Image (cartoon, rainbow, N blue to C red):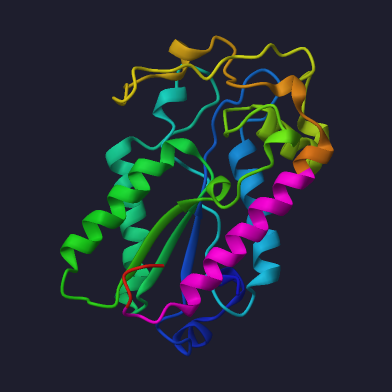
Amino acid sequence: MQLYEMNWPQVDQLPRDTPIVFPIAALEQHGHHMPLFTDSLLLGEVVRRVSERVADSVVIAPLMWLGNSEHHLDFPGTMSAAPRTYLDLLKEMAGNFLHHGFDRIVFLNGHGGNILPGQQALFEIRQRDRDWQNQLLLSTTYWDMAKPPADEFEQSQMGHACEWETSMMLALRPDLVGDYKHAETMPFGNPFPPAHRAWITKERTATGHIGSPSAASAEKGERLFSLFSAGTAVFLQKVADWDGVSWDG
């Protein structure tokens, strides 16, 4: 069910254990060859495909295109909500439906910079609503929903304007993809494990991309869309089928 197509009595008639899914993405630089709206376009396509599989099980809110992209602000065109502003925005979006009595909230993410804010926002809500025993608050990222076969891709993980994202854009909107074939490979690096190193994008790449865009193809993109959409649909159905009691998903 798409929230923007519903009226309020239809929402009010829903069981309060219906999962409410908030797609969250970004508008930020994606190197020399990819559009600023890449994350939102890709997540929007994943959500479109997922909605066809779980149409009667979940409510999908309109995609939130503004994300936490502070680390990309050195590249013109990037738009970002500051971390605390963004975290509070996520809390309030979820809080609207909690106010209406719904108890299953899912942030479905399509941008790496949203991962920690999404988790923190739901963590803060859960501490506030600690007596609400059957509350299920989840934050996940679509590319964690499946593991692409290693023999089909050069990369083993999502980068930025990389093989994976460039392939998906070639499958979805090839007219928006520039000269990816001559984009050099930018290594992911190994930033002081097991610690987490604070970083900004220009420290890692001058062009704005990370990974291997030149290895991309539309066929790979369709493969990724299929894998991620199928995995996300299975996950959301599991949320809808949760018994309201068990700890394990």
Tell me if residue 60 can be seen. Answer: no
94 to 166, vertically: above or below: below
Kindly identify the residue that appears in the image at 28 percent across and 48 percent down.
120
Magenta region, main secondary structure? helix
Kindly identify the residue that appears in the image at 55 percent across and 72 percent down.
237
- The stretch of residues the image draws in magenta is 222-245
Q: Quadrant of residue 100?
A: bottom left
Q: Find the residue positioned furthest to the front.
A: 151
161 to 67, vertically: above or below: above
Asked whether, in this view, residue 16 is left or right of residue 95, the answer is right
Locate residue 212, reporting x and y percent: 67, 21
130 to 182, vertically: above or below: below
Task: State which quarter of the image contains the C terminus.
Answer: bottom left
Which of the two residues, 152 or 114, is positioned nearer the viewer here? Answer: 152
Kindly identify the residue that appears in the image at 58 percent across and 28 percent down.
160
Locate residue 150, reporting x and y percent: 68, 36
Q: State the count of labels.
A: 0
Locate residue 135, reporting x and y percent: 30, 73
Q: Find the residue positioned furthest to the bottom.
A: 13
Which of the two residues, 139 or 75, is positioned nearer the viewer here? Answer: 139
Asked whether, in this view, residue 115 is left or right of residue 179, the answer is left
Asked whether, in this view, residue 231 is left or right of residue 96, the answer is right
Task: State which quarter of the image contains the N terminus.
Answer: bottom right
Locate residue 147, reporting x and y percent: 61, 45
Is residue 41 a member of the stretch shown in magenta?
A: no
Tell me if residue 183 can be seen. Answer: yes
18 to 199, vertically: above or below: below
